[in-house]
Image (tube, rainbow, N blue to C red):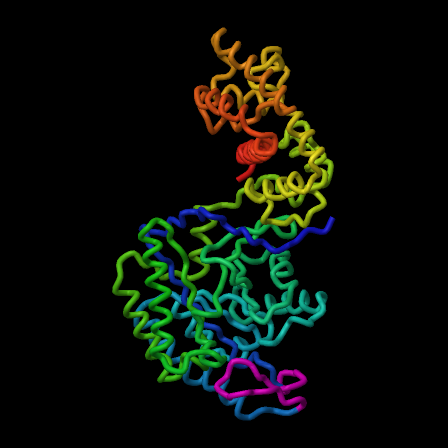
Amino acid sequence: MTRYPRDMRGHGPTPPDARWPGGARVAISLVLNYEEGGENCILHGDAASEAFLSDIAGAAQWPGQRHWNMESIYEYGARAGFWRLHRLFTGLNLPVTIYGVATALARSPEQVAAMQSAGWEIASHGLKWVEHRDMPEAEERAQIAEAIRLHTEVMGTPPRGWYTGRCSENTVRLTAETGAFDWISDTYDDDLPYWRHIGGRDQLVIPYTLEANDMRFATAPGYIEGEQFFTYLKDTFDTLYAEGAAGAAKMFSVGLHCRLIGRPGKIAGLKRFLDYARGHEGVWFATRGQIAAHWAATHPPQHYDRPSEMDRATFVARYGGIFEHSPWIAERAFDLELGPAHDSAVGLHNALARVFRSATRDERLAVLRAHPDLAGKLAQAKRLTQESTSEQASAGLDALTDDERRAFERLNAEYVARHGFPFIIAVRDHTKTGILRAFKTRIANDAETEFSTACAQVERIAALRLKDILP
């Protein structure tokens, strides 16, 4: 059955403690995209010139023609911008991750030598800096393989990280399936790394950014001066730094391009930010490879059976008893639009509860009647379900005095006679005394109030049961 693939839950309400080295409050990843010489250009065999991320207002592709102005702007990035940034980062001894387009690296041997001499991490940014959205899957797979081959040939070692940027819906899967990368970054969906199971293996994903990114100098709305870039970076840093101080350390990616931030008036804002961040304790400047290694060692992938990935028989067998003796609820829930968001206790409970709430009154009444009396004959005969046995024991209902047992038996009989179903309460939320008090109070409720109350308690019991078996 086709499932909804997007993961709206992520790390959930309690993300993991990053535990960055040295107790850092925030990890900063400086990423320099090296695309100059890999962009659309008829000299590169492309059908038209480049039109993306430049200082040319309203740029458009020129089919079949060279765009001299566009080419020269990209050349500025290689000829001047790169070296200005190289001097800045090496002068401050800051680690950098390069997103290197393979064909661009091949056309820039001196820049490559400088990257390697500085000890920077050089990841793959694809074969060419072109749009992939309409690229056939087979062609994109072939280009990924060629990017790895050419990168290895130019650098002497294969890339261990990947970011396409102008990607397709297949990019993350195709790159992960190669098994070649410690990390991939073609997502923008979190402030922390996370694992995805793709192609039979665990792939670490380190989300990137399009907003703390100098590309906003070339888009509208965007930055028009270095001070705006500094202000945005500073505000982001201050927020993440404060969260880190509160025990929720995060990662901060800063995206840069040689032809953009490498301009004198723009780099000034970056310099101000670097000075500002370096003036704080508890800041870890790291490459993405270092972040990946730390995350893999500190937060290795966790495997558990995910509801959205089960077949129907397994799903119903596993969750058919969450609502007491009512497997039809799990059967109907299986047919909902389940996805990664339902692979948690809260998520799956929502799906099961939806089925219960939308059922007919008679169907819901049957669920209520499927529940056993509290401390009743089934309990004494040890014929309760495992879940009910454990739940009643948690409140001491398996160890009643003779007087307490008689009280429960009397209340059970009165309640069923009045309402037509057993008294239901999430016993794990209460003590034995509290249960008896609620019992006596709720007997007097009118039929509709008690029906609604009992249904709410059924849902609460289901939620507690799911928390025992799902994260």
273, 90: nearer the viewer: 273
Whole-percent x, y for residue 105 in the image? 52, 75
Based on the displayed image, in which of its 4 quarters is residue 377 positioned? top right
Query: What residue appears at the point 35 percent right and 49 percent down from the top-left corner?
Result: 247
215, 453: nearer the viewer: 453
Whole-percent x, y for residue 314 in the image? 70, 36
Does residue 419 lie above or below 213 as drawn?
Answer: above
Residue 158 showing in the rendered view: no
Whole-percent x, y for residue 189 in the image? 52, 60
- Is residue 44 found inside the magenta-colored segment of the image? yes
Q: Which residues are magenta?
A: 42-64
- Is residue 348 found inside the magenta-colored segment of the image? no
Residue 180 showing in the rendered view: yes
Does residue 296 lie above or below 171 as drawn?
Answer: above
Looking at the image, residue 156 sits to the left or right of residue 170; the answer is: left
What secondary structure do most residues of the magenta stretch adopt? loop
Based on the displayed image, in which of its 4 quarters is residue 217 positioned? bottom left
